Amino acid sequence: MNFYDYDKLLEEAYEQLPEVMKKTSRFDVPEVNVFFEGNKTVLRNFSQVAKALNRDEKHLQKFLTKELGAYSLVSGDRLVFNKKLFGKKIGEAVKRYISEYVLCPQCGKPDTRFSTLEGVKILKCEACGAWKPLKSI
Ligand SMILES: [Zn+2]
């Protein structure tokens, strides 16, 4: 195998990574782990996901509740929705949360935090200093 082929292989492997993972290897978000309990859906690793995103559980919960149109309750490390939701749907909502409330709009890094600027809530990047107004949920 020559170098060209090796590069091509790497490129192909890279293409197959989810968008979020391409940004930085340090940003390791666990896949949502979901199971049904009667008519409810339990997101088993809710705390773990919030921690990986470095975001407040309440904020993430509020977003998911609205995005998925399902009432939810935190139970220990889990989040319990009052209806059946497929893991894929929850995973997609988490991805939307990441692009809206975690990744820097400028450099794409996850090194951001919530802040305020003249009374306006913003998402501020610690890496490059860029910011954007936070959409309220
Ligand atoms: Zn940035």
Image: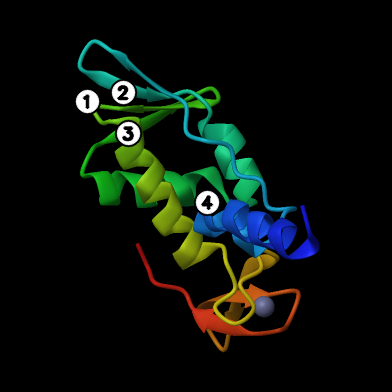
Residue depicted at x 64% and y 44%: 52
Quarter of image, ligand 1: bottom right
Q: Which badge, 4 or 1, is on the more N-terminal residue?
A: 4
Which residue bears the numbered disc 3? 72
Instruction: Report which residue position mark 4 lands on.
Output: 16
Above or below residue 78? Residue 12 is below
Task: Measure the C-alpha gap from mark 3 to mark 1.
Answer: 12 Å
Q: Dot 1 corresponds to which residue? A: 84
Relative placement, left or right, of 135 versus 47 is left
Instruction: Locate residue 65, reporting x and y percent.
Output: 31, 44
Instruction: List the residue tagged with mark 2.
Output: 41
Residue 75 in the figure: left or right of residue 65:
right
Whether residue 120 appears in this view of the structure is no
Question: How far apart are the alpha carbons under marks 4 and 1?
Answer: 29 Å
How many marks on residues?
Answer: 4
Q: Disc 3 versus disc 2: distance between alpha carbons?
A: 9 Å
113 left or right of 72 in image: right
